[in-house]
């Protein structure tokens, strides 16, 4: 039996079933730490950020897309009193994606500030979700989040829908186009593509 009313997830095969995978809370917390570590690298005294900026843009685009598809709807369903904060995060995500569209050495400072605010705001929502959802629910949501990230865009598209069901339809389609462009241009999009991947 579910502890909270979450968005529909695939049915479990039997009573007492424990899914494999990682909790959505653990995944999001780790990704936040990795993003902060990458920002520290890109703004440090020995930074050579060109490939790092491409990877930051791709990592953030995937991360925000997946959060908007699964994490934020789960928070809205499980914590109705947090609906206003969820809306504020969606609006902040759109502003961050708009800044990412013109990311360069000069706008990096603004991106750093926006990412730190994102980590604080979403981190608080994740902690509250962790307190009310069962471990099975968090793992099943984590599995959906990871699938969504693999299909997500690798470039910022602030004009696309930010809430289900439309973002779950549009974002993977846009992601296919982005991945073709990445392959053609040999653009790095993963932390592992960097000479020194940040540890989060």
Image (spheres, rainbow, N blue to C red):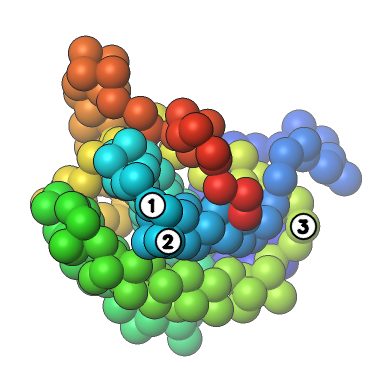
Q: Is residue 16 left or right of residue 109?
A: right
In space, the residues marked 2 and 1 are separated at their CA atoms by 5 Å
Q: Is residue 112 left or right of residue 71?
A: left
SS at mark 1 in the image? loop
In space, the residues marked 3 and 1 are separated at their CA atoms by 40 Å
Residues at badges 2 and 1 in contact (C-beta under 8 Å)? yes
The residue that appears at 39% across and 76% down in the rendered structure is: 117
Task: Say which residue label 2 marks.
Answer: 44
Q: Quadrant of residue 83?
A: bottom left
Residue 15 image offset from top left, x and y in percent:
84, 43
Q: Along the line of sight, which residue is nearer the eye, 51 or 4?
A: 51
Task: Say which residue label 3 marks.
Answer: 135
Q: Is residue 167 left or right of residue 181?
A: right
SS at mark 3 in the image? helix
Q: Measured along the vertical axis of the image, is residue 134 above or below residue 158?
A: below
Q: Along the line of sight, which residue is nearer the eye, 99 or 107?
A: 107
Task: Say which residue label 1 marks.
Answer: 47
The residue that appears at 69% across and 52% down in the rendered structure is: 23
Note whether residue 119 is visible: yes
Q: Measured along the vertical axis of the image, is residue 139 above or below residue 43?
A: above
């Amino acid at each position: 039996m579910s502890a909270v009313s979450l968005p529909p997830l695939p049915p479990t095969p039997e009573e007492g079933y424990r899914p494999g995978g990682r909790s959505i809370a653990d995944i999001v917390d780790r990704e936040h730490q990795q993003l902060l570590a990458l920002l520290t690298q890109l703004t440090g005294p020995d930074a050579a950020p060109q490939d790092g900026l491409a990877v930051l843009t791709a990592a953030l685009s995937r991360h925000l897309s997946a959060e908007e598809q699964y994490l934020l709807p789960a928070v809205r369903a499980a914590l109705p009193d947090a609906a206003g904060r969820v809306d504020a995060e969606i609006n902040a995500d759109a502003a961050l994606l708009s800044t990412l569209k013109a990311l360069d050495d000069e706008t990096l400072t603004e991106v750093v500030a926006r990412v730190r605010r994102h980590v604080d705001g979403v981190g608080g929502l994740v902690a509250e979700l962790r307190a009310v959802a069962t471990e099975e629910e968090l793992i099943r949501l984590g599995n959906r989040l990871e699938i969504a990230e693999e299909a997500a865009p690798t470039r910022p598209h602030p004009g696309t829908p930010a809430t289900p069901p439309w973002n779950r339809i549009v974002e993977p389609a846009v992601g296919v186009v982005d991945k073709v462009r990445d392959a053609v241009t040999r653009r790095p999009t993963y932390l592992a593509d960097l000479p020194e991947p940040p540890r989060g």
